[in-house]
Amino acid sequence: MTARRPSIRLIDAELARPTATSHETHILNRSTEMQLMHEDLARAHSQMRLEEAVRRERAHRLVVAHRVARRAEQASMRARRLLASVVVG
């Protein structure tokens, strides 16, 4: 089996295609850099918002837990007073 050689047309097309100058390459690199910087900034912003949401949710759960504990303590005190009044009365 012999390797196929590229046709003359393909070779001519390759040679005729303009190559990027160093200035164009520099602009493309800067453009890519800027795009990556914007992506990094968006990713960091999303991460900060997620962390803030997690902190807010934890704080909310803590407040709810304190509220439930306070109500349980109040119910316990009412039950003790009721029991004391029944025993004394």
Image: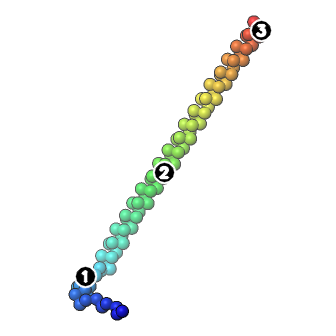
Find residue 64 and report its horizontal and vertical position in percent.
57, 32
**Which residue reaches farthest bottom?**
2
Q: Amino acid at mark 2?
A: Met
Q: Residues within 10 Å of mark 1 (few under 14, many from 20)?
A: few
Q: Amino acid at mark 3?
A: Val
* Residue at 34%, 91% in the rendered image: 3
Labelled disc at residue 88: 3
Tag 3 or tag 1, which sits nearer the N-term?
Answer: 1
Q: Quadrant of the C terminus?
A: top right
Could you tell me if residue 12 is visible in this image? no
Using residue 14 as the reference point, say whether residue 33 is left or right of it.
right
Labelled disc at residue 48: 2
Q: Secondary structure at mark 2?
A: helix
Label 1 sits on residue: 18
Could you tell me if residue 19 is visible in this image? yes
Which of the pair 9/52 is nearer the observer?
A: 9
Label 1 and label 3: CA atoms lie apart by 104 Å
**Which residue reaches farthest right?**
88
* Residue at 60%, 33% in the rendered image: 65
Q: Residues within 10 Å of mark 2 (few under 14, many from 20)?
A: few
Tag 3 or tag 2, which sits nearer the N-term?
Answer: 2
Q: Secondary structure at mark 3?
A: helix
